[in-house]
Image: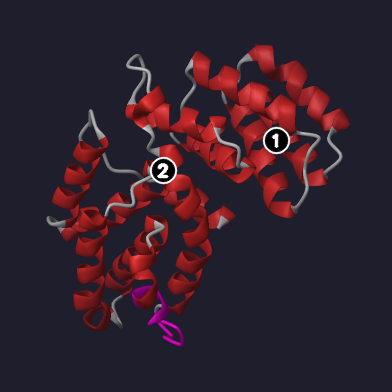
Amino acid sequence: MRKLLGVLFLMLPALAPAATLEEDVQNLVKVFSGDKNQHVPAVRTLAWMGVSDARVFDVVEQLLKSDANAAVGNRIEQDRVAHYIRALGFSGNPKYLPTLQSYAGDRTYERAMNNALRDFPQYQRWNSVISNRAGFDAKYSDDVNRVMNMLAADDVQLKGLGARRIFHAPHHDEAVLERLAQEAKANYTKTSDPESADAIAWMLKALGSARNPKYVALLEEAVRGAPDRKVKNGAAAGLKYYSR
């Protein structure tokens, strides 16, 4: 999931701003009901929007079922259909598990299915946290508010997802960077497995990518004191941005 989510963050569509989760849902339904050239970037937004609503994913599921066979042999079309499979993984909605599992053994789409099934349990936990508007601050965009929700989460991998979003968007708002620095400082010595190490490494790399001199000391501290090599490397990667 780590490398794949990095790719998913690279190109994102400009969805209409929304005041409510319902508006997010309606915007997505409109996109997936329209020009198929916009569907791949729309799927990529689902990695960080926190949407599970069946009204969105029913449309995606129908597109998958109607287009999967016809797309075989055409790389661009196969990629679009594979993104529909990934989208169902981002839904975290068990309603779509039978559809996902139906691609087991399929030479064209099994890889996308495996990635979606790997994502699924995480997004089942994460989506309600990411999209919770109770703490949204009107001073910031929806995207920034979602990132703040990710950073505030109890799940270190979700914090890492927020860090990747900060890096790729990019988001360098002072409040975002301060929260990111707080989380990085609190967690860089606490790695328990490769996934958590990867998440914390992304926090440090994203922090350095802002090139704000106030965070140099923290990055240097992590290079010296992090017990995990991947975390050290993330801090070192963050420091390199200051010399570019």
Asked whether 3 or 18 is in front, the reply is: 18
Q: Say which amino acid is labelled 2.
A: Ser
Residue 244 can be seen in this image:
no
For label 2, count other residues whose C-alpha is less than 10 Å away and answer few (under 14), some (14-19) or many (20+). some
Q: Which quadrant would the C terminus be assigned to in this image?
A: top right
Distance (Cα) linking label 2 and label 1: 32 Å
Residue 138 in percent (x, y) is at 32, 16
User: Label 1: how many residues lie within 10 Å, few (<14), some (14-19) or many (20+)?
Assistant: many
- Quadrant containing the N terminus in the rendered view: bottom right
Instruction: Name the residue at 31% across, 51% down.
Output: 41
Q: Chief secondary structure of the magenta span?
A: loop
Which of the labelled discs sits on residue 237, or is there none? 1
The correct choice, above or below, for 8 with respect to 83 in the image is above
Identify the residue shown where x is 81% and y is 35%: 189
Which residue lies at the image location 25% right of the left edge and 68% below the top edge? 61
Residue 197 in which image quadrant: top right
Q: Position of residue 101 (x, y in %)?
A: 42, 78
The reply, left or right, for residue 132 in relation to residue 67 is right
Residue 104 part of the magenta-drawn span: yes
Q: Is residue 61 left or right of residue 183?
A: left
Amino acid at circle 1: Ala
Quarter of the figure with residue 108: bottom left
Mark 2: which secondary structure?
Answer: helix
Classify 49 as above or below 214: below
Left or right of 141 on screen, residue 198: right
Q: Which residue is mark 2?
A: 128
| Vertical order, 177 against 2 (above or below) | above
**Foreground of the two, 230 or 26:** 26
97 in the magenta segment: no
Which span of residues is magenta-colored?
99-108
Please give the name of the residue rendered at 43% of the width and 34% of the height, measured from the top-left corner.
Answer: 169
User: Is 34 above or below relative to 242?
Assistant: below
